[in-house]
Image (cartoon, rainbow, N blue to C red):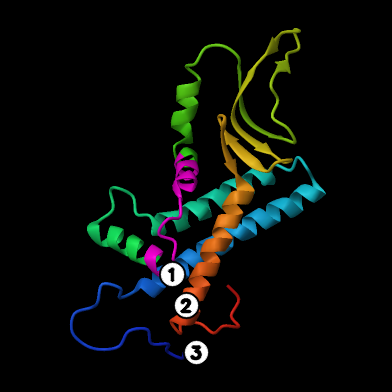
Amino acid sequence: MATFTRHWVNKGSGPKPDDFGDHFFLHEIQMQCDFGVRAYGEMRQLHQANAKNPSLLALAHAMLVFAGNAAKLLSAPKSASAQMKARAVRLRSHLNLANLDLSRIADARNYLEHFDERIERYLQIPGGIVFHRLIQDHEPLEVTLEDGRTLKPRILQLLNTSDWYLSLHGDRIQLIEVASLLEQIQASVHTYMVNAGMVKESSAP
């Protein structure tokens, strides 16, 4: 049988305060940020071994999903309850992230979640040639077909491994900026937890 040591955050009786349980959400935000940063690091290491490995795109997707999970907890969607919205505002205030713009992460996550709808929409656009997914060290401006024709490509998803961005039909998501943002959030959560006595200073963020 395992033995656990309790770490009290809130004590007392009566109605639960509004911030009751916030520490669970802080731990979740920190974990999602950590997963995203790890996915980015593994992607860069994998690229050194194989510049065309299909897992590069899988890791880019995973990174954005984790980033989106963290962003969702810090900026509740319009459909969220009043309690969830209030908690998101409160957490951002605690972490000194009230003015942090998370919209690009949310947009990228939504794109991936509704990718089937994007495919349907772009197949209706005439002209050019549509590519599903590419992993390249550059973004091709034109392609030549076997019959000699030169066309401008429309690429649903492109992972550029020189500048490290994911292009979602021309809308670029700079992965290094996302990784930096996740590290910033992670550090803010760690600082808050240390100051609140939830973790020790020596604990890794």
Q: Earlier in the sequence, mark 2 or mark 3?
A: 3
Which stretch did the figure color magenta?
92-110
Per the image, label 3 sits on a secondary structure element best described as loop
Q: Earlier in the sequence, mark 3 or mark 1?
A: 3
At a point 23% along the width and 78% down the height, the residue shown is 16
Residue 99, horizontal then vertical, whole percent: 42, 56
Residue ID for mark 3:
2
Residue 160, horizontal then vertical, whole percent: 69, 38
| Near-viewer residue (62 or 95) | 95
Q: Nearer the viewer, mark 1 or mark 2?
A: 2
Residue ID for mark 2:
193
Q: Distance between the residues labelled 1 and 2?
A: 8 Å
Quarter holding residue 50: top right
Q: In this view, does 52 lie above or below 69?
A: above
Residue ID for mark 1:
26
Amino acid under label 3? Answer: Ala
Residue 55, horizontal then vertical, whole percent: 68, 46
Magenta residue check for 105 = yes
Quarter holding residue 129: top right
Per the image, label 1 sits on a secondary structure element best described as helix
